[in-house]
Image: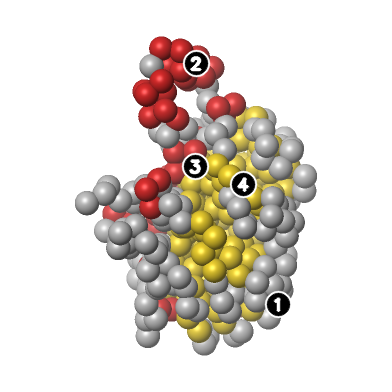
Amino acid sequence: MRRTIICLTAIHAMFFATTVAAETVDNQPQTSDIAILAEKALLTDITAIGDQILVAVGERGHILRSQDAKNWVQATVPVQANLNSVYFVNKQQGWAVGHDASILATQDGGVSWQLQHFAPQVDKPLFDVYFFDSQHGIAVGAYGLFYRTTDSGKNWQKEFHPEVLSEDDQDYLQQLQESDEQMYETELGAILPHFNRLYADGNVLYMAGEAGFVAKSIDNGLSWLRLDEFYNGSLFDITRTTQMSLLTVGLRGHAFISDDQGMNWQQVALTESATFNSAFSDASGRQYLVGNAGVLLVSDKTGKTYTDYSQPDGKAIVNGLIWQGQLILVTKVGIKTINLSELN
């Protein structure tokens, strides 16, 4: 049986140790099963389409859609791979990515989905997807896996970005290319860090990943500048706060903030030791840090002081968003909704 890569986003350290991508038959995609309690199963990402629709993705190809955050309808999806990220560029067009280098697309606001890319032989998951406009987008994942489309996903081209490597690793690759072509090809698939999360900040695109990796691009990801390392553990999210600082979070309760576009970082003083999976803000300026062991930290409006609202069930929280006065979380046990009034 082929080696199955465990999801290497923030939650890899915990529950994906036992949740693997669905096996395929003869490397062919299998339609996701409709599950009665899909909204209570592992979900990994959620996004809002305007103010009307929520779309969440998760294990075994589950994609759920809701108009009220209470009633969820599971879409028919042509793949059973675990899905890790979902992104909509407008109210109709969206993409979801996951294991088996799967890329799914919708043209009707998440009601139906089509498989655009499926490569189980690559044996690597995709962790995030972002579109600059309705035609141009990228998807990234484990060991530097990187795909680009210029035609709404009709075609996806694989890219390799050696500029994010250290000088020593770049020299090593060059020597291998000249001396051992077979080993060179092998190293191309393993030498890059895991690309865990993309974040667009105006015309600048940031990417965070394994072993303190943070890079930025000013040309839609065609080339990257790797920022100086400030932490040797993996980072799983990066975002801009409403106070206009960059915030990145990762393993073992580590969070860092930068006030100079990522040139220098300071660790945020927190007592939490569980891994942070995601960070996001609300319109009032509060930051939300969510993670393993039910971790939920909420800052005050200055973004400097955090209050612990961790969930007593201890189930990992993977991501979330603010929607219609509610905090909507996707977790190891599905959707969890908290009224913002409970967090005052």
Residue identifier under label 3: 145
| Label number found at residue 148 | 4
- Badge 4 element: strand
Residue 285 visible at all? no
Task: Report the residue marked by disc 1.
Answer: 51
Point out the frontmost of discs 4 and 3. 4
Q: Which residue is mark 2?
A: 174
**Of marks 1 and 3, which one's residue comes earlier in the chain?**
1
Q: Earlier in the sequence, mark 2 or mark 3?
A: 3
Pinpoint residue 59: horizontal percent, then vertical percent: 39, 66
Q: Is residue 217 visible?
A: yes
Vertical placement of residue 32 versus 11, above or below: below
SS category of the residue bearing label 3: loop
Q: Amino acid at mark 2?
A: Gln
User: What percent of the width, then of the height, locates residue 117?
Assistant: 51, 56
- Residue in view at x 29 percent, y 54 percent: 17
Residue at image location 71% in from the left, 72% down from the top: 91
Where residue 232 sits, quadrant-wise, is top left
